[in-house]
Amino acid sequence: DESGSDTTTAEGSETSDLEGTLRVLIHQNPPGVEFMENFNSEFEAANPGVTVDMSVVNADDIPTVNQTRLNAGDIDVTTISVTGFANPVQPYMEGADTPYWQQLIEAGLLMDLSDEPYLANYDEAAIADGTFDDGVYSINLGRTIYSGTFVNLDILGEVGVEVPTTWEEYIAACDAVEEAGYKCMVAGAQDGWPVFVGTYGLLGALYPDQQSLVEGLWTGEAAWNDEQGSELFARYETFSARLDAESAGLTGDSAAQRYVAGDIAFGPSGAWNAGVIEDGAAFEWTYIPFPGSSDAADNQTLFGKYDMAFAIAAETPVPDIASAYLAAFSEPENYNAFANATNYLPTQPTAELDNTLGAATAPLLQEGAFTVGFEQWW
């Protein structure tokens, strides 16, 4: 803080001499909006000279609103992307359009946060994935995982099979639960995309290095119809065949609600459905990386994307307030409350989700087993 003010956390008892209005932009997400409203009130109490003016827009409008307001100098702290930083265009991607956040950086509209001390509170990988040309331009605030499967532990226990760790064990488990009168798995096939989400785990298991796969496909060194690609598509076929027929009539939301009924062993889906299952399931469950490979060691990675990222406008007239705001938000206690309010998988190593999903994924996340998935690179 170059002004010499006594910046505090939002929950601190001290006050500061910061003065001014901080304009903040976030996307519509009811639990996230509620958390930020409470946080803003606490920040204002700790900084009596500061007013936080927060705007809330639909997620799809974030790119357009950012472009307009950053160019107009009408925003200070912004949700630069609802999905965090996607990956930049790679050198081998000749002719590809750059993502809009990269255009904002190259236009000089975002501040380099590299020297901010609060970055030390976040995982090194999360900061690295918000870095471009050696500058840190965003703080990735949470992760979304879409490559795993929910597992009904009660059904597996009754049938007498262990949680599968390989593709062959997964198919054998499906055989056992179906012979016992249960369903193997469902997905929201009516919407289409939930089936693809279910197969992201298969893709990642056979191609653990997603970045190399994308480069190989782009340059022609890899192909979907080579030996490994053919094996992948054969497993896609098996996966589709093992989806229960009722999947055809289920949407993404209704598939999660259907899984809660308790007669389905596996729910290959994104971690965002954990809330529905946590609230409605009367059975014990967990969430695991999809066991798509015959080698259990290749089935230990959670693939996904970052969900929401904060950035500061390069030309903000209140950089000291913006810095204090993100520093307060980044305090471990505040960030932990944010993660639990939004159910984002945390990007701070000290944060823990106080639910079943958190218990299931924390060991893998602590071991660095999260990586950005295929379509983010592609």
Image (cartoon, rainbow, N blue to C red):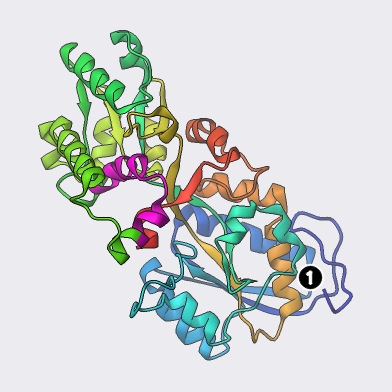
Above or below, 69 against 267 in this view is below
Above or below, 14 against 368 in this view is below
Is residue 213 part of the magenta span, yes or no? yes
Q: Is residue 146 left or right of residue 225?
A: right
Quarter of the image where one finds residue 137: bottom right
Quarter of the image where one finds residue 98: bottom left
Nearer to the camera, 275 or 97: 97
| Residue appearing at x 17%, y 17% in the figure | 178
Above or below, 281 against 341 in this view is above
* Local secondary structure at mark 1: loop
Looking at numbered disc 1 in the image, what kind of residue is underneath it? Pro
Quarter of the image where the N terminus is located = bottom right
Reading the image, the residue beneath label 1 is: 48
Residue range (magenta): 196-215
| Residue appearing at x 17%, y 38% in the figure | 234
Q: Principal SS element in the magenta part?
A: helix
Is residue 1 part of the magenta span, yes or no? no
Neighbor class of circle 1 (other Cα within 10 Å; few <14, some 14-19, many 20+) is some
